[in-house]
Amino acid sequence: MNYIDQEDALNYAIKEKLGSNAKYHIMTYGCQMNEHDSEKISWVLDQAGLQATDQIDEADLILLNTCSIRHSAENKVYGKLGELKAKKRERNLIIAVCGCMMQRKESRELVLEKFKQVDIIFGTNNIHKLPDLLLQHLETGDRIVNIEHSFQATDDQLWANRYFSYKSFVNIMYGCNNFCSYCIVPFTRGREVSRPSKDILEEVQTLVDSGVLEITLLGQNVNSYRPGLEGDYNFTRLIYDLAEIQGLERIRFMTSHPKDISDELLKAFKDLDKLCNFLHLPIQAGSNRVLEKMNRKYTREDYLRKIYRLRDLVPDIALCTDIMVGFPEESEEDFQDTLDLVREVEYDAAFTFLYSPREGTKAARNPNQVSQEIKKDRFDRLLDTMYPIFEKKNKALIGKTLDVLVEGESKHNGRMLSGRSDGFKLVHFEGEKDLIGKIVPVKIQEANSFNLGGERIHD
Ligand code: SF4
């Protein structure tokens, strides 16, 4: 069946089984990669003739785009699937589950066995096949499962329904080769594949032509971006090429692996105005012993060298990190190394986690797990150390004027707008809604550990 035939068949099957105004609702769990995958799923379903709805009770097709990074993320999905069982009894409803959890054999088998209400299961590499899977299910009534690792980066010609008109995510690579001993991602998303630079540059140009000011390049480890067949082309060259695009104002990227951050990339922060003065560089732990057990392949000294080099080049760079406490065998002394490092670097922000074992990883098999009580105590002490540092860094910005990309109304006060500075600081200020999507100067007047308040400066 060619694509047109398939589209006709799908439209016919949808109308017959679900009516002419079939609607879909997507629930997204997890990281920005998943959010962007949901934007692509939304685009694919729009092409298939369905309409998006944010009302779960209106939806004929409900998709759960799942995350498997932690047990708690998976438990939320199981809970939601339990709730949907009752809804499915009440009406004609199709339930699909996709994302990282479905790439993981144990979770997939559990869903297949315990949640008979699930009709379609597909993996992170099979979004483009969704119309075909939906058609198969509508025609046969069978449960359809497709989680093949069939995807090549050159296949990524899918468009996405972007949630914002002024900022956008752009995938530059998929998968990860690093095998950190606590992480399930290389097993769920597969090995690294980089998209051709030409495709990325064209995608960003199209986004900018449609009004996008800020892009965030996405990948599990963007620093190891290396498109096949393009010689020594690498991530830094991609950043320089993107910076040439007229009308693009801001470039961000995530996530970075400290071992792969090169000197030339650090220098790009100084050279390129468009590259935001913000680096998210996960350290995970401050102890070399723990870093080795995590298989992170750098030492705290390597990490600090890169931080100092970057601060030499760009003194006001904002730094963010990820820190995990309670990794198996982490001693009090190891934990003190983490606190020392936090005090030394003085991060602007951090994502902090209690280690939780992921089945199938090396760290989960370590018999010397740290008790929940100790983990919790260390976690609290970590936050007690970090919050005053965040506050000090934010208060140092009082009196300065920051360019803020306005993202919307403040969640807590309808009269206020919120946006992000170049250094990814959350800034609130009073203003009219027509500023949403624009970059405006804001003079900072107040600050706490998590955000800034200020006044818009008129040109
Ligand atoms: S770099 Fe490590 S933590 Fe990040 S996705 Fe790869 S294996 Fe997981």
Image: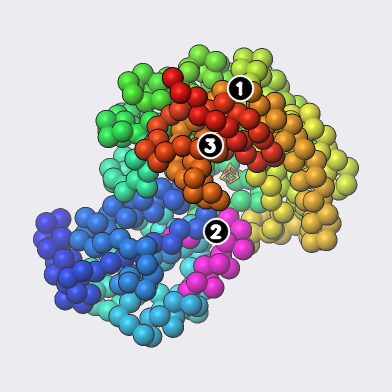
Whether residue 384 appears in this view of the structure is: yes
Principal SS element in the magenta part?
Answer: helix
Q: What residue type is labelled 2?
A: Ser
Q: In which quarter of the image is residue 390?
A: top right
* Residue ID for mark 2: 68
Question: In this picture, is 261 found above or below 174?
Answer: above
Q: Say if the magenta span includes residue 189.
A: no
Question: In this picture, is 173 found above or below 273?
Answer: below
Q: Quadrant of residue 226?
A: top left
How packed mark 2 is, by other alpha carbons closer than 10 Å (few <14, some 14-19, many 20 or more), is: many
Drawn side of residue 356 relative to residue 192, left or right: right
| Disc 3 secondary structure class | strand
Farthest residue in the right direction? Answer: 333
- Image point (17%, 70%), residue name: 20
- Image point (38%, 81%), residue name: 88
- Magenta range is 65-81
Drawn side of residue 323 relative to residue 151, left or right: right
Which quadrant does the C terminus fall into? Answer: top left
Residues at marks 2 and 1, CA–CA distance in whole angstroms: 41 Å
Dot 3 or dot 2, earlier in sequence: 2
